[in-house]
Amino acid sequence: MSLNAEKFIKYPLADRGLTPLERLMLKIGWGGPIKCTVCGSLAFMKRIKQNLRETCHCSVCGATNRKRQLALVVCDAVRRMRGGRVASVRDLARYPDLVIYNTETGGALSRELSRMKNYISSEYFGEEHNSGDTVKGKMHQDLTRLSLENESIDIVLSSDVFEHIPDPYRAHAEVYRVLRPGGRHIFTVPFYKTGFLDEHRTSIGAGGEFVHTKPALYHGDPVRRGGALVHNIFSLEMLVKLAELGFRTNLYQVHSYRHGILGSGAVVFEAMKD
């Protein structure tokens, strides 16, 4: 029998491509049944498109594939932290002393989290505001200058946010400050699964302006019409820098037909403060 060392490779992360079942669901545009990790409903997936990560909406709450990925890791983290059965984000309302801070205010995940007694959410409205200000009826927070108290939060959630921060590790340091011992930052970011160094797409010019070192890239943003500029795309370097800040980080490459988590791009991070 011939030897094949490649099967033992863990990093770079392998991109396995679509399975036959995923190709079928993509062709017909729907799939299921699933048990949604956001709302807890038995549902099916609709609007399945080529970008699996941002589609595959739950037929009940509308949560996308990406939000179910995040929710799955959140639920398991709470189970390990507090015990009990946690099948979906809706179940978190049973933990009245649990404090969760979410870096966005809209969408199915935030709606379910708002059932909790101690849920905090915010948006970023621009540098002209101070963290903690109320803007358009919502809390403004600059993640590099959080107004939250030291060791006041159990779980911080961010979903494709940190790539839009010019100095993301300053923001990670702020998250570390506000987390309680044993707390978690559970997040997704664009991540090069075969790379080692972060990609810096902008730099700061002599006048303080952003200079594009790569073609400008924008992601959809609920606050800004033109979208949010991508400053960084991350890779293995991120895990090293998080360790230097004091985090112990798990990388999950999630795949679960049962929960409607498809494709090989379902990478979720859990940065833990010991």
Image: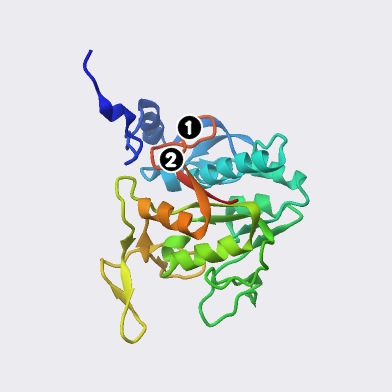
> Going by the picture, which residue comes out furthest to the left?
2
Q: Secondary structure at mark 2?
A: loop
**Residue 156 to residue 7: above or below:** below
Q: Nearer the viewer, residue 7 or 22?
A: 7
The three-letter amino acid code for the residue at tag 2 is Ile
Mark 2 — residue?
A: 48
Position in image of residue 156 (x %, y %): 60, 56
Q: Secondary structure at mark 1?
A: strand
The three-letter amino acid code for the residue at tag 1 is Gly
Q: How many marks?
A: 2
Q: Nearer the viewer, residue 27 or 136?
A: 136
Are the residues at dot 1 and dot 2 in contact (C-beta closer than 8 Å)? yes
Q: Is residue 203 left or right of residue 122?
A: left
Q: Quadrant of residue 253?
A: top left
**Residue 271 to residue 132: above or below:** above
Callout 2: 10 Å neighbours few (<14), some, many (20+)? many
Position in image of residue 22 (x %, y %): 39, 31
Position in image of residue 65 (x %, y %): 49, 43
Residue 121 appears in view? yes
Marks 1 and 2 sit apart, C-alpha to C-alpha, by 8 Å
Q: Nearer the viewer, residue 151 or 154?
A: 151
Upstream in the sequence, badge 1 or badge 2? 1
Q: Nearer the viewer, residue 269 or 113?
A: 269
Q: Is residue 214 left or right of residue 112?
A: left
Mark 1 — residue?
A: 31
Residue at 60% across, 75% down:
131
